[in-house]
Image (cartoon, rainbow, N blue to C red):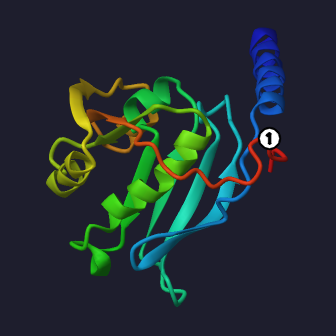
Amino acid sequence: MKWVHQLDNFRRERQAARAARFRFLRGFEEIRGDGFRLVLEEKLPEDLVHGWVPSYRFTMRPLHGRAELGTIDIRIGDNENIYYAGHIGYRVHPPYRGHHMAEKACRLIVRIARAHGMNQVVITCNPDNLPSRRTIERLGARLESIVDIPPDNELYLYGDRQKCRFIWDVPATDVSATDVTGDGQ
């Protein structure tokens, strides 16, 4: 059991060292788009124990109003979880589906990827999720492969067995972050 404690300490030290290098950007508290806006809800730091990279979590809202249309996350960095879950994850609430909200939100949130120096992002979906596949294809992403989820991956525990891996070349955007060094928050 001593080695388990040593491993946990090593992971915590490594996470602290990485966190010291990574900085969240300022200037993305709200991103406005065509008829709606993305409102920053959380900045989630890297978590080595769970295999999570730093991420920004947004709520999709109308330009004027507080209704929640859906959510979208962008994850910064690469690891095994990103291989299967992708850099961008979205969910549009049922009453608002069918209006290309996820596509529009992806086109807005990709500014953060560009500001962090990312030239490509991975977006994944389940093979049978045809609306999500069409959304990703409308972005211009290309299907790289359909991969099997390993049984020890968290997605497998949620019932996912395969993912379509799409690669999206990040378009040049008007990156409007005001502080690339950030404050780590």
Question: Could you tell whether 152 is left or right of 66 in the image?
Answer: left
**Is 50 drawn above or below residue 5 in the view shown?**
below
Depth check: 71 or 48 in front? 71
Three-letter code for the amino acid on which mark 1 is drawn: Thr
Q: Residue at x 55, y 63 (%)?
A: 58
Is residue 93 visible in the rendered image? The answer is yes
Q: Residue at x 45, y 70 (%)?
A: 33
Depth check: 100 or 147 in front? 100
Determine which quarter of the picture holds residue 86.
top left
Q: Residue at x 80, y 40 (%)?
A: 181
**Is 73 drawn above or below residue 17 in the view shown?**
below
Image quarter (top left, top right, bottom left or bottom right) of the N terminus: top right
Q: Where is residue 119 in the image (x, y as percent from the top left)?
A: 47, 31
Q: Position of residue 150 (x, y in %)?
A: 35, 23
Q: Position of residue 95 (x, y in %)?
A: 29, 81
Depth check: 65 or 115 in front? 115
Query: Which residue corresponds to mark 1?
Result: 181
SS label for mark 1: loop
Q: Which residue is drawn at 41% across and 38% down?
A: 85
